[in-house]
Amino acid sequence: MSATNIVKHLANLEKHLAEEHPENPVLARAVHSFRNLDRVAQDLGLLGRDESYATYVTWWPMIAVLGTFSSGKSTFINSYLGMHLQRTGNQAVDDKFTVICYSRHDEIKTLPGVALDADPRFPFYQISHSIEEIAEAGPQRIDAYIQLKTCPSEKIRGKILIDSPGFDADRQRTSTLRLTQHIIDLSDLVLVFFDARHPEPGAMHDTLEYLVTSTINRPDANKFLYILNQIDVTAKEDNPEEVVSAWQRSLAQSGLLAGRFYRIYDKDAAIPIDDPQIRERFEKKREEDLSDINARMQQIEIERSYRIAAMLEQTADAIENQVITKLESLLDRWRSRVFLFDSILFGLLLVLAGTALTLTDSWHLLQQCIASITAAEPPSLFGVALFLGLAGYIHLSIRGKVARGISSKLPEEYGHDHTACRQISQAFSKSTAGYRPMFLKKPAGWNGTNQRILAEVKEDANDFIQTLNDQFTDPSGHQEGTEAAAEQTTEADQPPTPAA
């Protein structure tokens, strides 16, 4: 996306959000704050002029459905939408991530992955440039990983639902694991499904490690719902509660000691439960848990607004307190190494030159050169300029080589976080460019103006959250009293009803 196109995209996004949510201006105002955040990041070199942090978030509420093979994810999605959208089966029936969104057309449509890769409104924008296995094979390989499905279900209007391929961490492709992590980071709600028909969770250590252990320490851990699906199969067990206990113990061993553990099954696909008491108990539990899950899915639009406001503050804070600190540390390391190599190389050249003059007994030539330079003779001045040019070239070569060496180590520090690694590397390259003097300790673009802009962005984010709180909370009860007074005033203004 060119710089002109990104500006146009942000303008269109701001207009769309203002029209879609006239009662909630926070989202449209947030786009303006993202523009300010982009300006700082572009000055620092974290983002290019054709990039924006606004494309790093989904502006539509997003629900991710993850789970093990045959855990009933697709059946749950079909039941939620009220239509047969996803294929179902006991074995893995789909190896792609499916993004599901609303369409006003009556028929269901399946679109290729490039529809998502090229559209900044969706969560997989330019993902083909981020996943190495896809990028190496070309952008067309994106179709082997993701697809877009549209349907007319009102349940999905205004939301994005993502169905993942059956999960098996120890056999999963690296690219699939990275896509899963990408989805988890962007989602407002993550439903993690497990299959009650396979009551041996200990055999799924790697899967539990990835889906549970790696998520419980996240700051947004409350967005994960862990669901034991197809629990109806345990109704014929001598002790059906033991199956649930086995899963709870396994999740506890993976670190999940708190939080809600849901038990559901699909009523249409359930096995018959003959005992009426057991059937009633299972159905009651199912309805309670499904009701809670649906309630969380309904309220994600509110969570989406808070998520975007929080991301503004978190990104601004990360730039100020983490990125700048990291860049200053890298620049200190870079300067120290450049000075060291400069000292070694130029010191060695001086020793060699002194040794050569001594062995050839030519020190008088050096005195003549100094006298010629002092007299400002043109040949001598040209020689000085040539010497300084050569020394400058050597120094710049050392600067560049040291900078590249430090940058080459960054992927080891950042691991799978390729985006952060790329941004730090870009900013570091800008700060070590040949035209910047080495004595400048602050990273390129880090000045008082940009510090004030970041402070304003964080202040705006806090204002957005307060505005959202005013919409959805009323601790003092003032709004209720104001609304009641307004209703009384309206009734008082009504003309009296004529007598019969």
Image: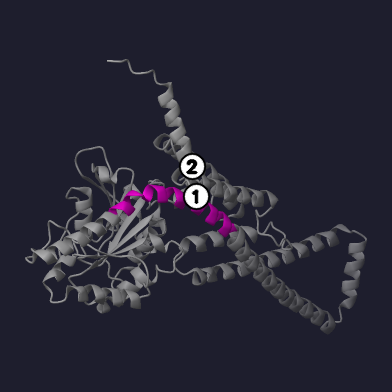
Q: Do callouts 2 and 1 mark residues in contact (Cβ within 8 Å)?
A: yes
Q: Indicate the position of residue 328 as horizontal and vertical percent values.
A: 65, 65
Looking at the rendered structure, the secondary structure element under dot 2 is helix
Relative to 392, residue 309 above or below: above
Q: Amino acid at mark 2?
A: Val
What is the total number of numbered labels drawn onto the structure image?
2
- Which mark, by number, is residue 309? 1
Q: Amino acid at mark 1?
A: Ala
Q: What residue span does the magenta drawing correspond to?
A: 294-319
Is residue 5 left or right of 370 when viewed as pictured?
Answer: left
| Magenta stretch encompasses residue 271 | no
Question: Badge 2 is on which residue?
Answer: 26
Quadrant in the picture for the C terminus: top left
> Which secondary structure dominates the residues rendered in magenta?
helix
499 or 52: which is nearer to us?
499
Is residue 490 left or right of 370 when viewed as pictured?
Answer: left
Q: Earlier in the sequence, mark 2 or mark 1?
A: 2
| Magenta stretch encompasses residue 296 | yes
297 or 81: which is nearer to us?
297
**Seen from this angle, which residue lies furthest front?**
499
Kindly tell me whether residue 319 is visible in this rendering. Answer: yes
